[in-house]
Image (cartoon, rainbow, N blue to C red):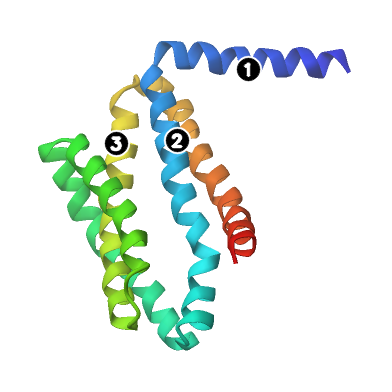
Amino acid sequence: MWEKVVHVVAVFGTYVSFFRRYPLLLAVGLISLLATLGFAVILPTLPLYLSEDLGIGAGIIGLIFGAYAASETIFKTPLGFFSDRFGRRPLIITGLAISLLVPLAMTFVHHYLYFVALQFLNGFAIAAFWPALSALTADKVPAEERTTAMTVFNMSYLVALGLGPALGTFLNHALS
């Protein structure tokens, strides 16, 4: 029993010392967590809203989500090149701003074509944000510690992806 406690304390100490050496990674992890949480909260509720409140069929809902996936796929490489050439910060900030505004805009539209366009724009925003944030993470640590740095980045993403749908579903039922 005590061996496990000692092991957990040692692992915790390792992460604390890592964040002391690279404090930016704590901010990157938090940004990754919050950005993904924002998307993951909407993930289970948007189809419900589209179908139940707006009467949009499953095929069109698939088109709306497909627009997001297509846009992210199309723009990720060119925007990654752009971040290499012109800097990480403009793309991170622009991607986050657009990702914040898209769900707000969705509350004002009612035709499915607007949702297709907004999700396409959201895919563009995510394509700007993630490669730049990932590259920033890699830029700020030496090569021998990149695995640990990327683990912080990826774990915050995965934690938010796991919590977001539950939180979104809870909020949807609590506020309905």
- Of circles 3 and 1, the one toward us is 1
Label at residue 60: none
Q: Is residue 111 left or right of residue 84?
A: right
Q: Residue 31: which quarter of the image?
A: top left
Q: Earlier in the sequence, mark 2 or mark 3?
A: 3
Label at residue 135: 3
Q: Secondary structure at mark 3?
A: helix
Q: Secondary structure at mark 2?
A: helix
Residue in the image at 37% along x and 61% along y: 103
Label at residue 12: 1
Residue 107: percent from the left, percent from the top? Answer: 37, 67
Task: State the CA–CA distance, disc 1 to disc 2.
Answer: 17 Å
Labelled pair 2, 3 in contact (Cβ < 8 Å): no
Task: State the CA–CA distance, disc 3 to disc 1.
Answer: 25 Å
Label at residue 153: 2
Q: Can you name the residue that lies furthest to the left here? A: 86
Q: Is residue 40 left or right of residue 94?
A: right
Callout 3, which amino acid? Ala
- From the viewer's perspective, is residue 16 above or below residue 95? above
Residue in the foreground of this view, choosing between 79 and 171: 171
Residue 1: percent from the left, percent from the top? Answer: 89, 18
Q: Is residue 105 left or right of residue 163?
A: left
Residue 142: percent from the left, percent from the top? Answer: 34, 19
Q: Residue 132: which quarter of the image?
A: top left
User: How busy is the neighbourhood of tag 2: few (under 14 within 10 Å), some, or many (20 plus)?
Assistant: many
User: How busy is the neighbourhood of tag 3: few (under 14 within 10 Å), some, or many (20 plus)?
Assistant: some
Q: Is residue 48 left or right of residue 34?
A: right
Callout 1, which amino acid? Phe
Q: Earlier in the sequence, mark 3 or mark 1?
A: 1
Callout 2, which amino acid? Phe
Q: Secondary structure at mark 1?
A: helix
